[in-house]
Image: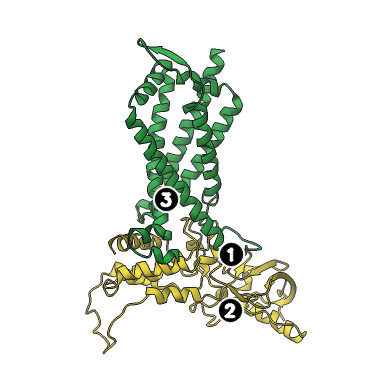
Chain colours: A green, B yellow
Amino acid sequence: MASQACSSGICGYLCSSIGKKQLMGVTAFLLIGFLKTHLLGNFLIIFGRDAFNEYCYRLMSLGPMLIVAEIILLAIFLTHLVLAISLVWQNKAARPVKYYSKKRTGRGATFASDTMPYTGIIILIFICLHLWSFKYGSYYEYELNGIIVRDLYQTVIEYFSNPLYTAWYVIAMIAMGIHLSHGVQSAFQSVGFRHARYTPIIKKLGCILSFFLTVGFAGLSIYGYYISTTLN
Amino acid sequence: MSTNMMKLKLKIWRQADHKSKGSMQDYDLENVSPDMSFLEMLDLLNENLINSGSDAIAFDHDCREGICGMCSLMINGEAHGPQKLTTTCQLHMRSFKDGDTIVIEPFRAKAFPVHKDLMVDRTAFDEIIAAGGFVSMNAGNAPDGNAIPIGKATAELAMDAAACIGCGACVASCENASAMLFTSAKLSQLALLPQGQAEAKERAISMVKKMDELGFGNCTNAAECEASCPKGIELSNIARMNREFFKSALSK
Protein backbone atom coordinates (compact mmCIF):
# COMPACT_ATOMS: atom_id res chain seq x y z
CA MET A 1 0.00 0.00 0.00
CA ALA A 2 1.26 3.44 -0.93
CA SER A 3 0.28 4.92 2.41
CA GLN A 4 2.43 2.35 4.23
CA ALA A 5 5.39 2.87 1.94
CA CYS A 6 5.52 6.53 2.96
CA SER A 7 4.26 6.66 6.49
CA SER A 8 6.90 8.75 8.20
CA GLY A 9 9.63 11.31 7.70
CA ILE A 10 10.00 13.47 4.62
CA CYS A 11 8.24 10.94 2.39
CA GLY A 12 5.23 10.73 4.69
CA TYR A 13 5.15 14.50 4.80
CA LEU A 14 5.18 14.82 1.01
CA CYS A 15 2.47 12.15 0.61
CA SER A 16 0.14 13.84 3.09
CA SER A 17 -2.63 16.32 2.34
CA ILE A 18 -0.99 19.02 4.46
CA GLY A 19 2.50 18.40 3.07
CA LYS A 20 1.23 18.77 -0.48
CA LYS A 21 -0.67 21.95 0.40
CA GLN A 22 2.40 23.45 2.05
CA LEU A 23 4.60 22.64 -0.94
CA MET A 24 1.89 24.22 -3.13
CA GLY A 25 2.16 27.34 -0.97
CA VAL A 26 5.95 27.53 -1.02
CA THR A 27 6.14 27.04 -4.81
CA ALA A 28 3.42 29.71 -5.13
CA PHE A 29 5.57 32.20 -3.18
CA LEU A 30 8.55 31.44 -5.44
CA LEU A 31 6.46 31.79 -8.62
CA ILE A 32 5.12 35.15 -7.41
CA GLY A 33 8.73 36.23 -6.85
CA PHE A 34 9.47 35.31 -10.46
CA LEU A 35 6.39 37.19 -11.72
CA LYS A 36 7.48 40.39 -9.99
CA THR A 37 10.97 40.18 -11.54
CA HIS A 38 9.47 39.39 -14.94
CA LEU A 39 7.15 42.41 -14.76
CA LEU A 40 9.99 44.73 -13.75
CA GLY A 41 11.98 43.53 -16.78
CA ASN A 42 8.97 44.03 -19.05
CA PHE A 43 8.65 47.65 -17.97
CA LEU A 44 11.88 48.35 -19.89
CA ILE A 45 9.71 48.17 -23.04
CA ILE A 46 8.55 51.68 -22.19
CA PHE A 47 12.14 52.94 -22.42
CA GLY A 48 12.38 51.80 -26.02
CA ARG A 49 14.05 49.27 -28.26
CA ASP A 50 17.61 49.79 -26.99
CA ALA A 51 16.80 49.46 -23.29
CA PHE A 52 14.63 46.34 -23.72
CA ASN A 53 17.03 44.61 -26.11
CA GLU A 54 19.99 45.36 -23.84
CA TYR A 55 18.12 43.78 -20.90
CA CYS A 56 17.44 40.66 -22.99
CA TYR A 57 21.03 40.55 -24.19
CA ARG A 58 22.40 40.79 -20.65
CA LEU A 59 20.05 38.06 -19.49
CA MET A 60 21.04 35.77 -22.37
CA SER A 61 24.74 36.42 -21.81
CA LEU A 62 24.44 34.78 -18.37
CA GLY A 63 24.77 31.56 -20.40
CA PRO A 64 24.86 28.40 -18.27
CA MET A 65 23.66 30.30 -15.20
CA LEU A 66 20.51 31.27 -17.05
CA ILE A 67 19.91 27.64 -18.03
CA VAL A 68 20.29 26.56 -14.40
CA ALA A 69 17.84 29.28 -13.35
CA GLU A 70 15.40 28.17 -16.04
CA ILE A 71 15.60 24.54 -14.92
CA ILE A 72 14.93 25.56 -11.30
CA LEU A 73 11.99 27.70 -12.41
CA LEU A 74 10.61 24.84 -14.49
CA ALA A 75 10.99 22.46 -11.54
CA ILE A 76 9.10 24.89 -9.26
CA PHE A 77 6.35 25.30 -11.83
CA LEU A 78 6.01 21.56 -12.51
CA THR A 79 5.90 20.84 -8.76
CA HIS A 80 3.07 23.34 -8.38
CA LEU A 81 1.28 21.82 -11.39
CA VAL A 82 1.67 18.15 -10.45
CA LEU A 83 0.59 18.82 -6.84
CA ALA A 84 -2.42 20.76 -8.09
CA ILE A 85 -3.50 17.87 -10.31
CA SER A 86 -3.05 15.38 -7.46
CA LEU A 87 -4.96 17.53 -4.95
CA VAL A 88 -7.84 18.33 -7.34
CA TRP A 89 -8.09 14.64 -8.24
CA GLN A 90 -8.41 13.70 -4.56
CA ASN A 91 -10.89 16.51 -3.95
CA LYS A 92 -13.16 15.33 -6.75
CA ALA A 93 -12.97 11.75 -5.48
CA ALA A 94 -13.88 12.86 -1.95
CA ARG A 95 -17.47 13.61 -3.01
CA PRO A 96 -18.61 11.04 -5.59
CA VAL A 97 -22.33 11.92 -5.30
CA LYS A 98 -22.98 15.60 -5.93
CA TYR A 99 -25.58 17.72 -4.16
CA TYR A 100 -28.91 18.37 -5.83
CA SER A 101 -28.69 21.90 -4.50
CA LYS A 102 -25.56 23.58 -3.09
CA LYS A 103 -25.29 27.20 -2.08
CA ARG A 104 -22.27 29.30 -1.15
CA THR A 105 -22.73 30.76 2.32
CA GLY A 106 -21.32 34.07 1.11
CA ARG A 107 -19.04 34.16 4.15
CA GLY A 108 -16.39 31.78 2.84
CA ALA A 109 -15.74 30.69 -0.74
CA THR A 110 -15.38 33.29 -3.47
CA PHE A 111 -15.44 33.17 -7.26
CA ALA A 112 -11.62 33.09 -7.11
CA SER A 113 -11.43 30.16 -4.68
CA ASP A 114 -14.03 28.16 -6.63
CA THR A 115 -12.25 28.61 -9.95
CA MET A 116 -8.63 27.94 -8.91
CA PRO A 117 -8.23 24.84 -11.14
CA TYR A 118 -9.78 26.61 -14.14
CA THR A 119 -7.77 29.83 -13.85
CA GLY A 120 -4.75 27.55 -13.33
CA ILE A 121 -5.45 25.76 -16.64
CA ILE A 122 -5.74 29.13 -18.44
CA ILE A 123 -2.35 30.14 -16.98
CA LEU A 124 -0.81 26.80 -18.07
CA ILE A 125 -2.05 27.23 -21.66
CA PHE A 126 -0.90 30.83 -21.59
CA ILE A 127 2.63 29.94 -20.47
CA CYS A 128 3.03 27.32 -23.23
CA LEU A 129 1.85 29.75 -25.92
CA HIS A 130 3.85 32.57 -24.34
CA LEU A 131 7.13 30.62 -24.57
CA TRP A 132 6.26 29.56 -28.12
CA SER A 133 5.57 33.15 -29.23
CA PHE A 134 8.41 34.97 -27.50
CA LYS A 135 11.26 32.77 -26.26
CA TYR A 136 11.04 30.48 -29.28
CA GLY A 137 9.27 33.05 -31.48
CA SER A 138 10.36 35.05 -34.51
CA TYR A 139 14.06 35.99 -34.50
CA TYR A 140 15.32 39.37 -35.62
CA GLU A 141 18.76 40.86 -35.27
CA TYR A 142 19.61 44.32 -34.07
CA GLU A 143 22.85 46.21 -33.71
CA LEU A 144 23.28 47.53 -30.19
CA ASN A 145 26.50 49.51 -29.51
CA GLY A 146 28.29 47.57 -32.23
CA ILE A 147 27.12 44.13 -31.06
CA ILE A 148 24.55 42.07 -32.97
CA VAL A 149 21.82 41.09 -30.48
CA ARG A 150 18.36 39.56 -30.71
CA ASP A 151 15.69 42.18 -31.46
CA LEU A 152 13.12 40.80 -29.00
CA TYR A 153 11.49 44.25 -28.99
CA GLN A 154 10.52 43.65 -32.65
CA THR A 155 9.11 40.17 -31.79
CA VAL A 156 7.04 41.64 -28.96
CA ILE A 157 5.65 44.55 -31.01
CA GLU A 158 4.92 42.20 -33.92
CA TYR A 159 2.97 39.87 -31.58
CA PHE A 160 0.88 42.62 -30.02
CA SER A 161 0.11 44.20 -33.41
CA ASN A 162 -2.58 41.51 -33.65
CA PRO A 163 -5.47 42.76 -31.46
CA LEU A 164 -6.69 39.16 -30.93
CA TYR A 165 -3.33 38.20 -29.39
CA THR A 166 -3.44 41.30 -27.20
CA ALA A 167 -6.98 40.45 -26.08
CA TRP A 168 -5.96 36.85 -25.23
CA TYR A 169 -2.96 38.15 -23.28
CA VAL A 170 -5.21 40.50 -21.28
CA ILE A 171 -7.73 37.72 -20.57
CA ALA A 172 -4.96 35.38 -19.42
CA MET A 173 -3.57 38.08 -17.12
CA ILE A 174 -7.02 38.64 -15.59
CA ALA A 175 -7.22 34.87 -14.97
CA MET A 176 -3.81 35.08 -13.30
CA GLY A 177 -5.00 37.98 -11.15
CA ILE A 178 -8.07 36.03 -10.04
CA HIS A 179 -5.88 32.97 -9.30
CA LEU A 180 -3.50 35.05 -7.17
CA SER A 181 -6.22 36.98 -5.34
CA HIS A 182 -7.12 33.71 -3.58
CA GLY A 183 -3.70 32.08 -3.93
CA VAL A 184 -1.64 34.54 -1.89
CA GLN A 185 -3.73 34.37 1.28
CA SER A 186 -4.29 30.65 0.77
CA ALA A 187 -0.53 30.02 0.63
CA PHE A 188 -0.03 31.86 3.94
CA GLN A 189 -2.78 29.76 5.56
CA SER A 190 -1.31 26.51 4.18
CA VAL A 191 2.12 27.18 5.66
CA GLY A 192 0.36 27.82 8.97
CA PHE A 193 0.56 31.60 9.17
CA ARG A 194 -2.69 32.99 10.50
CA HIS A 195 -3.08 35.86 12.91
CA ALA A 196 -6.12 37.88 13.97
CA ARG A 197 -4.33 41.14 13.19
CA TYR A 198 -2.14 40.24 10.20
CA THR A 199 -4.33 37.85 8.18
CA PRO A 200 -6.83 40.57 7.11
CA ILE A 201 -3.84 42.69 6.02
CA ILE A 202 -2.33 39.75 4.10
CA LYS A 203 -5.67 39.21 2.32
CA LYS A 204 -5.78 42.88 1.26
CA LEU A 205 -2.11 42.98 0.23
CA GLY A 206 -2.63 39.76 -1.76
CA CYS A 207 -5.48 41.36 -3.69
CA ILE A 208 -3.50 44.57 -4.25
CA LEU A 209 -0.48 42.56 -5.48
CA SER A 210 -2.71 40.53 -7.84
CA PHE A 211 -4.25 43.74 -9.13
CA PHE A 212 -0.90 45.40 -9.84
CA LEU A 213 0.56 42.29 -11.51
CA THR A 214 -2.53 42.01 -13.74
CA VAL A 215 -2.61 45.71 -14.60
CA GLY A 216 1.16 45.73 -15.13
CA PHE A 217 1.34 42.79 -17.55
CA ALA A 218 -1.98 43.55 -19.29
CA GLY A 219 -1.20 47.26 -19.49
CA LEU A 220 2.17 46.57 -21.15
CA SER A 221 0.50 44.31 -23.73
CA ILE A 222 -1.93 47.11 -24.58
CA TYR A 223 1.03 49.49 -24.72
CA GLY A 224 2.67 47.05 -27.17
CA TYR A 225 -0.44 47.14 -29.35
CA TYR A 226 -0.43 50.94 -29.23
CA ILE A 227 3.25 51.13 -30.24
CA SER A 228 2.62 48.72 -33.15
CA THR A 229 -0.10 51.04 -34.48
CA THR A 230 2.21 54.06 -34.33
CA LEU A 231 5.00 52.20 -36.19
CA ASN A 232 2.82 51.28 -39.17
CA MET B 1 -55.35 26.63 15.41
CA SER B 2 -53.54 29.82 14.62
CA THR B 3 -54.00 31.26 11.17
CA ASN B 4 -50.32 31.56 10.34
CA MET B 5 -49.81 27.84 9.69
CA MET B 6 -47.56 27.27 6.70
CA LYS B 7 -47.88 25.06 3.66
CA LEU B 8 -44.58 23.76 2.30
CA LYS B 9 -43.29 21.87 -0.69
CA LEU B 10 -40.48 19.54 0.31
CA LYS B 11 -37.91 17.88 -1.93
CA ILE B 12 -36.29 15.12 0.11
CA TRP B 13 -33.59 12.55 -0.71
CA ARG B 14 -34.97 9.00 -0.34
CA GLN B 15 -32.65 6.02 -0.40
CA ALA B 16 -33.70 2.54 0.79
CA ASP B 17 -30.27 1.48 2.11
CA HIS B 18 -26.58 2.17 1.58
CA LYS B 19 -26.44 0.00 -1.54
CA SER B 20 -29.55 1.37 -3.29
CA LYS B 21 -29.63 4.26 -5.68
CA GLY B 22 -31.59 7.14 -4.18
CA SER B 23 -33.58 10.00 -5.69
CA MET B 24 -35.25 13.27 -4.74
CA GLN B 25 -38.96 12.88 -3.86
CA ASP B 26 -41.58 15.63 -3.61
CA TYR B 27 -43.85 15.98 -0.57
CA ASP B 28 -46.52 18.55 0.32
CA LEU B 29 -46.90 19.39 3.98
CA GLU B 30 -49.63 21.51 5.57
CA ASN B 31 -50.19 22.84 9.10
CA VAL B 32 -46.54 23.63 9.75
CA SER B 33 -46.28 25.98 12.71
CA PRO B 34 -43.54 28.66 12.53
CA ASP B 35 -42.69 27.68 16.11
CA MET B 36 -41.78 24.11 15.17
CA SER B 37 -38.13 23.18 14.94
CA PHE B 38 -36.97 21.83 11.60
CA LEU B 39 -36.87 18.30 12.99
CA GLU B 40 -40.40 18.64 14.41
CA MET B 41 -41.52 19.58 10.91
CA LEU B 42 -39.96 16.31 9.69
CA ASP B 43 -41.68 14.47 12.59
CA LEU B 44 -45.01 15.86 11.37
CA LEU B 45 -44.28 14.72 7.83
CA ASN B 46 -43.32 11.26 9.13
CA GLU B 47 -46.57 11.00 11.12
CA ASN B 48 -48.49 11.73 7.92
CA LEU B 49 -46.40 9.17 6.02
CA ILE B 50 -46.90 6.48 8.67
CA ASN B 51 -50.66 7.16 8.84
CA SER B 52 -50.89 6.75 5.09
CA GLY B 53 -48.98 3.46 5.29
CA SER B 54 -45.73 4.76 3.75
CA ASP B 55 -42.18 4.35 4.98
CA ALA B 56 -41.08 7.15 7.34
CA ILE B 57 -38.08 9.27 6.35
CA ALA B 58 -34.96 8.31 8.32
CA PHE B 59 -32.90 11.20 9.68
CA ASP B 60 -30.27 11.59 12.39
CA HIS B 61 -31.16 13.33 15.66
CA ASP B 62 -30.60 12.93 19.36
CA CYS B 63 -30.48 15.73 21.94
CA ARG B 64 -32.37 18.33 19.90
CA GLU B 65 -30.64 20.96 22.02
CA GLY B 66 -27.82 21.78 19.61
CA ILE B 67 -25.07 20.12 21.65
CA CYS B 68 -24.78 16.46 20.65
CA GLY B 69 -23.74 16.82 17.00
CA MET B 70 -26.10 14.10 15.79
CA CYS B 71 -28.41 16.12 13.53
CA SER B 72 -27.19 17.03 10.08
CA LEU B 73 -28.99 17.77 6.76
CA MET B 74 -28.24 20.02 3.82
CA ILE B 75 -31.18 22.41 3.77
CA ASN B 76 -31.59 24.39 0.54
CA GLY B 77 -27.93 23.74 -0.22
CA GLU B 78 -26.57 24.85 3.18
CA ALA B 79 -25.33 22.61 5.99
CA HIS B 80 -27.75 22.95 8.94
CA GLY B 81 -29.79 25.44 6.90
CA PRO B 82 -29.76 29.19 6.44
CA GLN B 83 -29.21 30.38 10.02
CA LYS B 84 -25.66 31.11 11.20
CA LEU B 85 -24.21 29.24 14.22
CA THR B 86 -27.26 26.97 14.42
CA THR B 87 -27.71 23.22 14.23
CA THR B 88 -30.66 21.79 12.28
CA CYS B 89 -32.46 20.89 15.52
CA GLN B 90 -32.26 24.52 16.68
CA LEU B 91 -33.43 25.89 13.34
CA HIS B 92 -37.09 26.91 13.46
CA MET B 93 -39.70 27.01 10.74
CA ARG B 94 -40.05 30.79 11.17
CA SER B 95 -36.87 30.95 9.07
CA PHE B 96 -39.08 29.89 6.14
CA LYS B 97 -42.15 31.37 4.46
CA ASP B 98 -45.55 29.92 3.62
CA GLY B 99 -45.38 28.28 0.18
CA ASP B 100 -41.58 27.80 0.24
CA THR B 101 -39.95 24.84 -1.45
CA ILE B 102 -37.32 23.30 0.82
CA VAL B 103 -34.66 20.94 -0.53
CA ILE B 104 -33.41 18.45 2.09
CA GLU B 105 -30.40 16.23 1.38
CA PRO B 106 -27.98 14.16 3.44
CA PHE B 107 -24.41 15.38 4.10
CA ARG B 108 -22.37 14.08 1.19
CA ALA B 109 -18.81 12.78 1.20
CA LYS B 110 -17.10 9.55 0.20
CA ALA B 111 -16.14 9.09 3.86
CA PHE B 112 -19.77 9.70 5.00
CA PRO B 113 -21.83 6.95 3.31
CA VAL B 114 -25.63 7.30 3.39
CA HIS B 115 -27.28 4.59 5.51
CA LYS B 116 -30.87 5.35 4.57
CA ASP B 117 -32.63 8.51 3.33
CA LEU B 118 -31.05 11.39 5.28
CA MET B 119 -29.10 9.21 7.74
CA VAL B 120 -25.36 9.40 7.28
CA ASP B 121 -22.61 7.22 8.75
CA ARG B 122 -20.06 9.56 10.35
CA THR B 123 -17.95 6.80 11.93
CA ALA B 124 -15.00 8.27 10.02
CA PHE B 125 -14.85 11.07 12.60
CA ASP B 126 -14.62 8.53 15.42
CA GLU B 127 -11.75 6.86 13.59
CA ILE B 128 -9.86 10.18 13.42
CA ILE B 129 -10.33 10.64 17.18
CA ALA B 130 -9.26 7.03 17.85
CA ALA B 131 -6.10 7.66 15.80
CA GLY B 132 -4.80 10.26 18.27
CA GLY B 133 -7.42 12.69 19.55
CA PHE B 134 -6.79 11.80 23.19
CA VAL B 135 -4.22 12.00 25.98
CA SER B 136 -2.88 8.90 27.73
CA MET B 137 -2.58 9.31 31.50
CA ASN B 138 -3.06 7.41 34.71
CA ALA B 139 -6.65 8.07 35.74
CA GLY B 140 -6.14 7.81 39.50
CA ASN B 141 -7.64 10.32 41.89
CA ALA B 142 -8.95 13.56 40.43
CA PRO B 143 -5.99 15.98 40.16
CA ASP B 144 -5.98 19.22 42.15
CA GLY B 145 -7.56 22.12 40.35
CA ASN B 146 -5.08 24.64 38.92
CA ALA B 147 -2.14 22.32 39.61
CA ILE B 148 -1.00 22.99 36.05
CA PRO B 149 -1.06 26.74 35.31
CA ILE B 150 -2.63 27.64 31.98
CA GLY B 151 -3.02 31.23 30.77
CA LYS B 152 -6.56 32.53 30.42
CA ALA B 153 -6.17 33.33 26.68
CA THR B 154 -4.77 29.87 25.92
CA ALA B 155 -7.47 28.16 27.98
CA GLU B 156 -10.12 30.10 26.02
CA LEU B 157 -8.61 29.08 22.67
CA ALA B 158 -8.55 25.42 23.75
CA MET B 159 -12.15 25.71 24.93
CA ASP B 160 -13.21 27.32 21.63
CA ALA B 161 -11.68 24.37 19.76
CA ALA B 162 -13.33 21.93 22.16
CA ALA B 163 -16.73 23.41 21.28
CA CYS B 164 -16.70 21.23 18.13
CA ILE B 165 -19.61 18.79 18.36
CA GLY B 166 -18.38 16.65 15.44
CA CYS B 167 -21.54 17.04 13.36
CA GLY B 168 -19.71 17.04 10.02
CA ALA B 169 -21.11 20.31 8.65
CA CYS B 170 -17.53 21.32 7.77
CA VAL B 171 -17.13 18.26 5.55
CA ALA B 172 -20.62 18.71 4.08
CA SER B 173 -20.16 22.36 3.18
CA CYS B 174 -16.59 22.01 1.88
CA GLU B 175 -16.32 21.90 -1.90
CA ASN B 176 -13.68 19.18 -1.43
CA ALA B 177 -15.36 17.28 1.43
CA SER B 178 -12.32 18.02 3.58
CA ALA B 179 -12.34 17.16 7.28
CA MET B 180 -9.60 19.59 8.22
CA LEU B 181 -11.73 21.88 10.40
CA PHE B 182 -12.93 18.94 12.51
CA THR B 183 -9.50 17.31 12.74
CA SER B 184 -7.79 20.61 13.52
CA ALA B 185 -10.28 21.44 16.30
CA LYS B 186 -9.77 18.04 17.90
CA LEU B 187 -6.01 18.42 17.57
CA SER B 188 -5.96 22.03 18.79
CA GLN B 189 -7.91 21.40 21.98
CA LEU B 190 -5.01 19.20 23.09
CA ALA B 191 -2.10 20.91 21.32
CA LEU B 192 -2.84 24.15 23.16
CA LEU B 193 -2.67 22.60 26.62
CA PRO B 194 0.32 21.27 28.61
CA GLN B 195 -1.39 17.89 29.05
CA GLY B 196 -1.38 17.44 25.27
CA GLN B 197 2.34 18.05 24.74
CA ALA B 198 3.67 14.57 25.60
CA GLU B 199 1.96 12.97 22.59
CA ALA B 200 1.78 16.05 20.35
CA LYS B 201 3.98 14.73 17.54
CA GLU B 202 2.41 11.28 17.30
CA ARG B 203 -1.04 12.85 17.53
CA ALA B 204 -0.54 15.29 14.65
CA ILE B 205 0.90 12.62 12.38
CA SER B 206 -1.63 9.88 13.22
CA MET B 207 -4.71 12.07 13.01
CA VAL B 208 -3.72 13.63 9.67
CA LYS B 209 -2.72 10.24 8.27
CA LYS B 210 -6.05 8.71 9.30
CA MET B 211 -7.95 11.69 7.87
CA ASP B 212 -6.15 11.24 4.53
CA GLU B 213 -6.71 7.45 4.49
CA LEU B 214 -10.44 7.84 5.04
CA GLY B 215 -10.76 9.65 1.71
CA PHE B 216 -11.57 13.18 2.85
CA GLY B 217 -10.52 15.93 0.43
CA ASN B 218 -7.87 18.60 0.83
CA CYS B 219 -8.27 22.12 2.15
CA THR B 220 -8.41 24.96 -0.39
CA ASN B 221 -8.69 27.60 2.34
CA ALA B 222 -12.05 28.83 1.06
CA ALA B 223 -13.51 28.86 4.61
CA GLU B 224 -16.97 27.50 3.78
CA CYS B 225 -16.47 25.16 6.77
CA GLU B 226 -15.97 28.05 9.18
CA ALA B 227 -19.02 29.82 7.72
CA SER B 228 -21.20 26.70 8.09
CA CYS B 229 -19.98 25.51 11.49
CA PRO B 230 -22.81 25.65 14.06
CA LYS B 231 -20.23 26.11 16.82
CA GLY B 232 -18.10 28.80 15.16
CA ILE B 233 -14.89 26.76 14.98
CA GLU B 234 -12.33 29.02 13.34
CA LEU B 235 -9.93 28.52 10.46
CA SER B 236 -7.04 29.42 12.77
CA ASN B 237 -7.31 25.83 14.04
CA ILE B 238 -6.42 24.56 10.56
CA ALA B 239 -3.41 26.89 10.48
CA ARG B 240 -2.37 25.49 13.87
CA MET B 241 -2.73 21.92 12.58
CA ASN B 242 -0.65 22.86 9.51
CA ARG B 243 2.13 24.11 11.84
CA GLU B 244 1.85 21.13 14.21
CA PHE B 245 1.96 18.67 11.34
CA PHE B 246 4.95 20.37 9.72
CA LYS B 247 6.90 20.33 13.01
CA SER B 248 5.96 16.72 13.76
CA ALA B 249 6.31 15.12 10.34
CA LEU B 250 9.77 16.50 9.65
CA SER B 251 11.20 15.78 13.09
CA LYS B 252 9.94 12.19 13.35
In the picture as drawn, the residue positioned furthest to the top comes out as: A146
Q: Residue B73 vs residue B165: left or right?
A: right
Residue closer to the observer: B191 or B112: B112
Which quarter shows the N terminus of chain A?
bottom left
The residue where tag 1 is placed is: B78
Q: Residue furthest right?
A: B52
N-term-proximal mark, 2 vs 1: 2
* Disc 3 to disc 1: CB gap under 8 Å: no
Q: Nearer the viewer, mark 2 or mark 1?
A: 2
Label 1 element class = strand
Residue denoted by label 2? B60
Q: Residues within 10 Å of mark 1 (few under 14, many from 20)?
A: many
The residue depicted at 51 percent of the width and 22 percent of the height is A138
**At 36% from the left edge and 72% from the top edge, which residue is drawn?**
B159
Kind of residue at disc 1: Glu
Give SS at disc 2. Answer: loop
Q: Give the chain letter at badge 1.
A: B
Q: x and y percent of residue B91 in the render? A: 58, 72
